[in-house]
Amino acid sequence: MEGDMIFGAHMPTVGGVDKALERGAEIGCEVIQIFVKNNMQWLGKAPGVDAVERFKHFQIQHPFACIFGHTGYLINLGAPPSPNRDKSIQSLIQEIEIATVLKLPFLVLHPGAHLGQGEEAGFQQIAEGLNEVIRATHSSPVRIALEITAGQGTCVGYRFAHLQRIYDTADTPARLAICLDTAHLFAAGYDIRTPKGWSNTIKEADDALGVKEILAIHLNDSKVDFNSRVDRHAGIGQGRIGKEAFRHIINDPRFQKTPGCLETPKSPDLHEDVENLALLRDMEKSKAAARRSTRSHRSI
C-alpha cells in the first residue's frame, strides 16, 4: 500500500539480545531497535554463541522487516583529543563488530558534542573519528546512521547542513546513513506539525543528503516546546508536536517501507508501546481508506 511505513519500537535486551525479539514479537513490532551492549558502558560483553544462535533462530521463526541497533550514550566522537574520545572510538568499533555478528544493517549514532571547541572543530573530530572506526571495521557491511539531534548543549547535528559537512569530510560516505527523529527535529527548530512544514523539512534533507540516505525514523512526540533545543520524548499525541502531525509524517509516500520506531517512555509491561503502535496504525489505515474512497469516487 502506498506510503506504508513499518512500525516498531526500541526493545530492552534484559536477559539477552534474543529476549528483545521475543518482547517485540509479543507486542506486534514489525521493526525493532536494540542496544547491542550495555548502553552506559564503554566496552561491554559481546553476546555469547548461544545467544547469537537464539537471536538468529527467532528471526527465522518470527521474521521482522528490520532489526537495527542504537549506539551507547557515552560515545562522543565530537570531543577534542582525550581518553574519553579514544574510548568512544573503541566502543563504536566494538558495537559495529557485534552488529556484524548479529547481521544488523545499521547502527544509529548521535554525531557528538564539541564540548566548547566550536562546531567547526566538532565536525572535523566527528569525521576523523568515523574514518578511524570505518578503517578498523572495513570488512563490515554495517552502516552508521547519523541521527539528527535536538542541539542540546554543545551537540552538533541539529541541522541537515551539519550532517552534510560530516558526509563531505568522511573518507567512506557509503558507510554512513541518516536517522530522523521527530522530537529532535521539532526541538531543533523544524516545524513538522503541518504537512507544509514536514515537506519543507524533508526537502532540506533531500537537498543536503538525499532522501535515500534516511534509513529509519524515530517516531517520538516532544515534551518540550518548538525550537527549545532540549531532547525530551513523549508518547504519540502526548506532547507539543501533537497527534495529527504524525498522520502526514507516517503517510508520506517517500518513506514507504521505512522503519518507524518508537522511543517513547514505557513501563516494563510495554503497554505504552502497544497503545502508541495501535494509534499509528489507525492513522495509517484511515489515510489509506480516504485514498481508496477518493479513487472510487473519481471512477464513478
Image (spheres, helix red, strand yellow):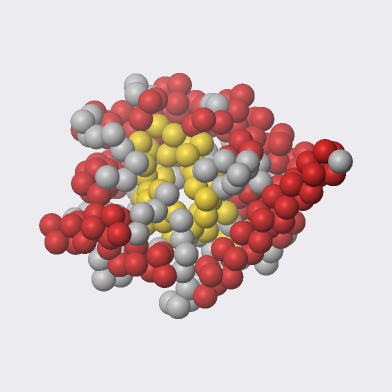
Is residue 48 among the parts visible in the rendering? Answer: no
Residue 266, position in %: x, y?
A: 50, 71
Which image quarter: residue 36? bottom left
Where does residue 170 sit, x and y in percent of width and height? 38, 24
x and y percent of residue 18 in the render? 27, 63
Q: Is residue 105 left or right of residue 211?
A: left
Please determine whether, in this image, residue 26 is positioned above or below residue 227: below
Q: Nearer the viewer, residue 291 or 259?
A: 291
Residue 83 located left or right of residue 254: left
Residue 111 at x, y = what percent?
44, 40
Residue 243 appears in the figure: yes
Farthest residue, direction left: 49
Q: Considering the image in quadrants, where does the C terminus appear? A: top right
Quadrant of image for the N terminus: top right
Q: Residue at x 13, y 57 (%)?
A: 49
Question: Which residue is at the front of the view, 209 or 119?
Answer: 209
Q: Residue at x 66, y 61 (%)?
A: 282
Extreme-front residue of the structure:
300
